[in-house]
Image (cartoon, rainbow, N blue to C red):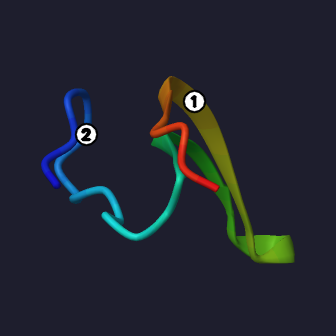
Amino acid sequence: MPARHVKPSLIKECPANIECQVIDIVERYNIVVLQAVAAGWTGAR
């Protein structure tokens, strides 16, 4: 399933998806800081 705001595809089998962009990478602690730009729910389950 194509995402609306980011390049990677959404996972079709997941009832909920969050599209995120990388804001920062803190290499010293191996932390990736993300910002959610969209969220969706199929209503399944």
- Chain-order first, disc 1 or disc 2: 2
36 to 9, vertically: above or below: above
Residue 17 placed where, x, y %? 50, 47
* Disc 1 residue type (three-letter): Ala
Residue 36 disc label:
1
3 to 1, vertically: above or below: above
Please tell me which residue lies in front, 43 or 3.
43
Residue 40 placed where, x, y %? 48, 31
* Disc 2 residue type (three-letter): Val
Residue indicated by mark 2: 6
9 to 28, vertically: above or below: above
Location of residue 34 (image quadrant): top right
- Residue at the extreme right of the image, as rendered: 29
Local crowd size for mark 2, using a 10 Å CA cut-off: few (<14), some (14–19), many (≥20): few
Residue 4 placed where, x, y %? 20, 29
Taking 1 as reference, is 28 left or right?
right
User: Residue at 22% across / 41% down in the picture?
Assistant: 3
Locate the C terminus and report the quarter of the image it occupies: bottom right
User: Residue at 23% across / 58% down in the picture?
Assistant: 8
User: Residue at 70% across / 72% down in the picture?
Assistant: 27
Location of residue 13 (image quadrant): bottom left
Cα separation between marks 1 and 2? 10 Å
Taking 30 as reference, is 5 left or right?
left
Residue 29 placed where, x, y %? 86, 74
Please tell me which residue lies in front, 7 or 28.
7
